[in-house]
Image (spheres, grey):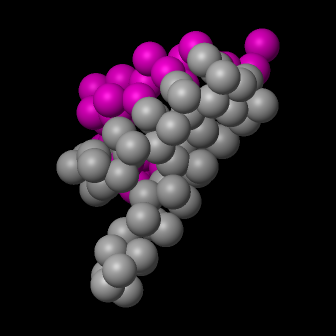
Amino acid sequence: MPWSLCRHVERQAQLMGEMMERLGVDPVAAARRQHGTAFVQARTTCLLCRSISDCRRWIEGAPEAEHPSRFCPNMPFFESCLRY
């Protein structure tokens, strides 16, 4: 696998983790949802996502950043795993 692809996978995994943390997603609940298959699907969705810039801006707290509900295809999954 080319190194650029490895770096992309690592960056996307990091963004997903940061997004989950900032939103208050319970990582255990996320990992258990549908016996782990929902998390795998969310990870795949993140790997293929084209909203990297929007995601990074929101994670970094940029004032002009839109809420992830406007650009993140994983929001329904994240919302289903929020800590209460």
Q: How many marks?
A: 0
On the image, the x and y values in percent for residue 77 come to 50, 21
**Residue, x 51% and y 38% (percent of image)?**
40
- Whether 66 is drawn above or below 7: the answer is above
Quarter of the image where the C terminus is located: top right
Between 65 and 70, the one lying in front of the other is: 70
On the image, the x and y values in percent for residue 11 come to 45, 66
On the image, the x and y values in percent for residue 22 come to 61, 40
- Whether 21 is drawn above or below 75: the answer is below
Q: Quadrant of residue 26?
A: top right
Quarter of the image where the N terminus is located: bottom left
**Residue, x 33% and y 74% (percent of image)?**
5
Q: Quadrant of residue 82?
A: top right
In this rendering, position of residue 12 left or right of residue 78: left
On the image, the x and y values in percent for residue 46 come to 38, 45
In this rendering, position of residue 76 left or right of residue 5: right
**Residue, x 63% and y 30% (percent of image)?**
36
- Whether 1 is drawn above or below 81: the answer is below
Q: Residue furthest bottom?
A: 3
Reply yes or no: does residue 74 show up in magenta. yes
Magenta region: which residues? 55-84
Whether residue 25 is visible to the viewer of this picture, yes or no, is no
Whether residue 58 is visible to the viewer of this picture, yes or no, is yes
Reply yes or no: does residue 29 show up in magenta. no
**Residue, x 66% and y 42% (percent of image)?**
21
